[in-house]
Amino acid sequence: MNIVVLAGGLSAERDVSFVTGKNVADALREKGHKAILLDVFMGYSDKPEELTGIFERSEEVSAAVSGISQEAPDLETVRKSRKDQSKSLFGPNVIELCRMADIVFMALHGANGEDGRIQAAFDLYGIKYTGTGYLSSAVAMDKGLSKRLFLANQIPTPKSVSMDRTACQWEFSETGLTLPCVVKPCCGGSSIGVSIVRDEKEYQQALKEAFRWEEKVIIESYVKGREFSVGVMDFQALPVIEIAPLEGFYDYKNKYAAGSAVETCPAQLSPSITEKMQHYAVEVAKALGLETYARMDFLLDEQENIYCLEANTLPGMTPMSLLPQEAQAVGMDFPKLCEEIIRISLKKYA
């Protein structure tokens, strides 16, 4: 197949997306596919190009990848570096190349990737892509909205409130929650802008940090417990994986710095808790309408109460990412996982 692996963009998770994309492109080439790794924002070339036969040169024309830095990228610098300075998210030749492909593998993370906007554009262009559709992507991206759907479908989640910058409650006592709590951007990923708050001063600092990234934030009751994740493919749960950071919580650094967390798959849980967590993961997929694949994050407190935090519609596919480890636990290696995601995604277009 001729495949565009779409990565990069204008998200705080831009660097992570490139590493996901490179891993996917390499794996698909290993399986005999012609895969071009393409930056959705920078595009391919800023000059008129003859694109016929470009998939025969897939490795040559693919975007270069350097790795994940310890800090999120400066997006303003990224914007200024594009030669055409267009206001469009789609860089030169992106739509043309995606229309030429048999399918686009969505390796994007965060805003303008997981929020459904690109999926909606592709639907209008008749471009096939991996992952769920535009509406379910948008719903899952909004943590406040998805939490309301969790509760409506009897899926436990920590108590929370949402607020935007224009109507922010800067006094913690006005939130109706108790300390400690967690403050996070409403639609962000990779734990960027997330803070654990223990007093009023930390609360106000955490709000300022979260508002650096978005106009809307979530304040959530803090749950002390173990962290888990469960992948779902075609409404079937994968094994549960446990994530135990060596220091602090599972933040941006601990997610992408080698050796920062111990990950155990299958997680060491009782059969009943495992089954219940997998059940909730599938119920989240059904509640949000996640058609193809996703990964749900959970906490388990000391009384063995399970809480769902969020759904990730385009989970990371880096060497340290969770979904590939879960697939490996059931005998599905990384190249096979990439092909299986494509197979499931193509069912939407049958």
Image: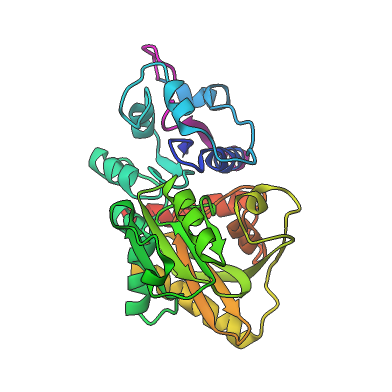
Residue 233 picture location, percent across and down:
48, 64
Residue plotted at (54% across, 58% down): 195
76 left or right of 190? left
- Could you say where residue 232 lies in the image, as x and y percent from the top left? 49, 66
Q: Residue at x 54, y 64 (%)?
A: 197
The x and y percentages for residue 221 are 48, 73
Q: Which quadrant of the structure image shows residue 302?
A: bottom right
Residue closest to the eye, 264 or 97: 264
Q: Quadrant of residue 46?
A: top left
- Is residue 7 on the magenta stretch? no
Q: Residue furthest left?
A: 124
Q: Which quadrant is home to the C terminus? A: bottom left
| Residue 342 appears in the rendering | no
Vertical arrangement, residue 148 with respect to residue 339, above or below: below
* Residue 38 in magenta stretch: yes
Magenta residues, start to end: 27-51
Measured as percent of width and height from the top left, residue 89 is found at 35, 32
Quick check: 310 left or right of 337? left
For the point 56% across and 69% down, which residue is it? 238
- Asked if residue 254 shows in the view, the reply is yes
Q: Which colour assignment does the render follow? A: rainbow
- The residue closer to the viewer here, 45 or 140, is 140
Query: What is the total number of numbered labels drawn onto the structure image?
Result: 0
Q: Main secondary structure of the magenta part?
A: loop
Residue displayed at 30% across by 27% down:
87
